Amino acid sequence: MEQHSLADSNVDWQALLEHVVRDRVVVEVQQDSATVARILPVASAMPLSRLNRALAAIPSLGEDVESFAAELQSCRQALPLEPNPWD
């Protein structure tokens, strides 16, 4: 996370905002030693038509798939079930 001071007169705020949008970074704005604001990119929604392309871009687990499944199962067993409010 980047930090910039309000007291810094050399900050090009327009360029900083463009940087946040383009590079998807979060910037904290400091006044004295306190954070007074955060500048962050707006979450962009993905159209449903791009879902197949997005899923295809996820790397395959390959040989790790079995160990990943076992690890998930172990995590599920280690966590207590939440009570069902309808019971």
Image (tube, helix red, strand yellow):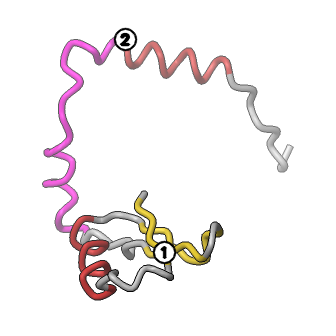
The answer to the question of whether label 2 and label 1 lie on touching residues, with beta carbons closer than 8 A, is: no
The kind of secondary structure the magenta stretch mainly shows is helix
In the figure, residue 64 lies in which quadrant? top left
For badge 2, the amino acid type reads: Ser
Q: What stretch of residues is rendered in magenta?
A: 48-66
- Residue 55 in the magenta stretch? The answer is yes
Q: Position of residue 24 (x, y in %)?
A: 30, 65
The verdict on residue 37 being magenta is: no
Q: Is residue 73 above or below residue 28?
A: above
Image spot of residue 11 (x, y percent): 34, 81
The residue where tag 2 is placed is 67
- On screen, residue 78 versus residue 42, left or right, reads right
User: Which residue position holds label 1?
Assistant: 5
Secondary structure type for disc 2: helix
Check disc 1 and give the amino acid type.
Answer: Ser
Q: Secondary structure at mark 1?
A: strand
Q: Is residue 59 above or below residue 71?
A: below
Residue at 38% over, 76% down: 42
